Image (spheres, rainbow, N blue to C red):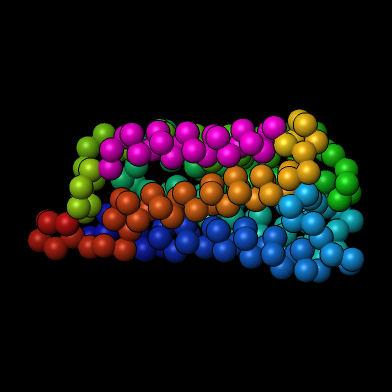
Amino acid sequence: MRAVPRWALLSSAAAPVFLIGGWTLAATRQPGGFDQVGDTISALAAVDAADRWIMTVGLLGLGLCHCVTAAGLRAARPAGRLLLALGGVATLAVAALPLPAMSGTSAPHRAAAVVSFGALALWPALAAPTRRPPGTAAAVPASHGTAAAALLLGLVGWLLVELVGGGARLGLAERVAAGAEALCPLLAVLALGGGRRRANGSP
């Protein structure tokens, strides 16, 4: 029996591929080039962006992957899993509520993004199991989840500083924060024994 289902391992591994692959490919399709350091991920899915479907698919895939992974992380605490799923649903809303223009703003889009970044930063702190899950080699200390959440919140804080201050590295800050949040579920799955089987009741 697997501590974490194989499909949850696959969904957690696919999440950063959807996100990073989406922003990389979509940026190459913008006429005149695209500044990934200064411009946001959302601009690539804006209504007037060239081939906006690429980044839209990337965001939809990312959100769905988070929801699937949350369903498969049965060894994690329910509160953490719910926050991960909330982050996935909010990411779907980000895709469904695009910016009206690459240089424009949208209150619904921004609200969805805030919920997404917040939930995906906080969930590790609430997900660490209180005892060793069946099928894992050792317990996952709660301090690991707290440290991961602190790191993610620090990256989101950098993003907020760039956003509020109109910084020239807004796109870079967003990509670092979003990329770290996309990788975190994969690390959690691996830590909880994703892909390993129990034999005769032993990990």
Where residue 87 sits in the image (x, y, percent)?
A: 56, 41
Looking at the image, residue 40 sits to the left or right of residue 117; the answer is: right
In this rendering, the answer to whether 12 lies above or below 168 is below
Q: Quadrant of the N terminus?
A: bottom left
Q: Is residue 192 visible?
A: yes
Where residue 138 sits in the image (x, y, percent)?
A: 20, 47
Looking at the image, residue 150 sits to the left or right of residue 90; the answer is: left
Is residue 16 highlighted in magenta? no
Looking at the rendered structure, the number of numbered marks drawn on it comes to 0
Where residue 23 sits in the image (x, y, percent)?
A: 70, 60
Is residue 152 highlighted in magenta? yes
Where residue 45 sits in the image (x, y, percent)?
A: 78, 55
Residue in the picture at 78% in, 49% down = 38
Residue in the picture at 26% in, 34% down = 130
Residue in the picture at 73% in, 45% down = 169
Closer to the camera, 150 or 102? 150
Closer to the camera, 65 or 151? 151
Closer to the camera, 188 or 134? 188
Looking at the image, residue 99 sits to the left or right of residue 13; the answer is: right
Please identify the quarter of the rendering in which residue 165 is found.
top right
Q: Quadrant of the C terminus?
A: bottom left
Q: Is residue 80 visible?
A: no
Q: Which residues are magenta?
A: 140-161
In this rendering, the answer to whether 120 lies above or below 60 is above
Closer to the camera, 159 or 114? 159
Residue in the picture at 54% in, 34% down = 153
Magenta-drawn stretch, dominant element (helix, strand or loop)? helix
Q: Residue furthest front?
A: 168
